[in-house]
Amino acid sequence: MKIALAQIVPKLGEVEANVETHLEILEKARKRKAELVCFPELGLTGYTLKDLVEEVALDPAADPRFRKVVAATRGLSAVVGFVEESPSDKGLFYNAAAFIADRRVLHVHRKVFLPTGGIFEEAKFFAQGREFRTFQAPFGRAGLLICRDFLQFGSSYVHYAAGADAIICISAAPGRGVAGGDAFETSRMWELMGEAVSYFSTAYVIYANRAGSEDGVTFAGGSFVYAPGGRLVARGASVDPDLVVCRIDMEEVREARKKWLFRRDEKPEAVWRSLERIVRAPED
Amino acid sequence: MPPRINGPFVEKVLVAFIRDELGRCGCRKALLGLSGGLDSAVCAALAARALGPRNVLGLIMPYGRAFAADVKDAAALARRLGIRHRTIDIAPQIDLYFAAHPTRSRVQRGNKMARERMAVLYDFSAREGGFVLGTSNKTELLIGYGTIYGDMACAINPMGDLYKTQVRDLAVHLGIPAAIRRKAPTAGLWPGQTDEGEIGLSYDELDLILHGLVEGRKSRRELIEAGHAAAAVDRVIGRVKGSGFKRTLPPIAKLSIRSVGHDFLYPYDRGR
């Protein structure tokens, strides 16, 4: 099947305008026969929101703007980044990703690891998500991550242990360091993780990052797809906007798992027992 | 109106702020532009109490003979507070400039004058070895009613978290003469200009809307439901949104792994 990575430049704080961008990209991707379109983290709002968080927050089940995006997914799937405020949790704002398939929201992931330090101040403005959970997507079992979630490698492990065929990370990763050729140095960090996770989880790793700049920070672009076993399938433009359309084959998951027995031999119960002991009584 | 302030308590906090910020740099002197209006009068009174009147220099910087009454009020205030003051006419350099580069825009002329006053203040900062005190209040900062790199430029600003209506309360407490307190507030960019005329709202209503937006975190709809005219609310929200650039340092394009203004972060008062 074909998938698309929408390396867009959201308009900061303007949900309506970003909804229109999402609708346009969905149509473009549909014309190119993509069955899955991944938009970046906070694609519906822009990233550097600060106190705008509460103004752009929405309930994905009821908000008419979000429903417009949902309605535009007839016959395909999309991963959409937004600020979530659910009616049962008023006043708490989550950096969230929704997986929508054929006009139904199948899953919402709330970002667990909120980077706070250096240029990042997410925990000042967002509530923290509490779990990683896979779900059945049309093409197989999938797990969602948002940006920094992916760099804390336990997150990918949880999806892998739950049997994910694809780990999808949407991102708004700024570029830092210019000693690395025609891309920001930090782009390599993401690819390194993508390559390693796809290799050792024998799953697809799909990474959609954004482009553009906000308040002096340039987002690095460089979205990518790694096939199980660490094979780079496609890579988006560095820094510039892009719509990456590439072909993936879920059979490759099966082929990789026949060849590399990591998944078969995995022992989540041993990991769990060890983790439980560490969480209850930190090792001395 | 925004909450009434406790004059003695606010005075105590701001006097300590001025004294501490300067003291950390081993400095006891401050200077500020005296317009003859309310904000600079309050700031001068605070500085006089923080540093001792003789350590405060008020610069009165009229453009020629315009605003002669304000010049008189400013000088009278300086004498009353016991602070030093000097009058410097900025007309020669302003006239020279606009003779070479004429404009019909009175806003442009006014902004140029505001920046000239800033340049004079900073020159005297070096001559005096003193800090330039800012006099922009919270109302002005929020709606961007000030000249960027003009009257908004300063080393420290004791006034920036007080709404105009609160500055009025503080002025009463500090004994600022009624002649200054009762004057129609003006940016003084041209004769006859008044803040309320230009903004199109009274300070009482403006501050009420701003206080609802900022401290109250009210939405546009809630403010209108609370009885404000939709046009007034929209005008205020528009001005706040449109002036964000005046309330922050210019963005620096981030390239490296640690950048000034982004993730090279130290407290202003580091090591002082």
Image (cartoon, rainbow, N blue to C red):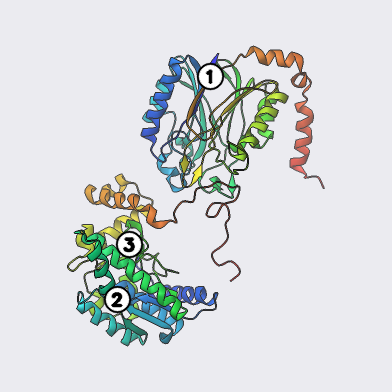
Q: What element does badge 2 sit on?
A: loop
> Is B13 drawn above or below residue A33 in the view shown?
below
Q: Mark 3 lies on which chain?
A: B
Q: Mark 2 points at which residue?
A: B61
Q: Distance between the residues labelled 3 and 2?
A: 16 Å
> Is A209 drawn above or below residue A106 in the view shown?
below
Q: Which mark is residue A135?
A: none
The amino acid at mark 2 is: Met
> Is A137 drawn above or below residue B268 in the view shown?
above
Instruction: Give B59 or B137, whichever is nearer the viewer.
Output: B59
Residue at left offset 54%, top offset 75%: B25
Residue B57 pos. (x, y %)? 38, 81
Q: Mark 2 lies on which chain?
A: B
Q: Which is in the foreground here, disc 1 or disc 2?
A: 2
The amino acid at mark 3 is: Thr
**Counting residues from the N terminus, which is met first, the one under dot 3 or under dot 2?**
2
Q: Name the residue under label 3.
A: B147
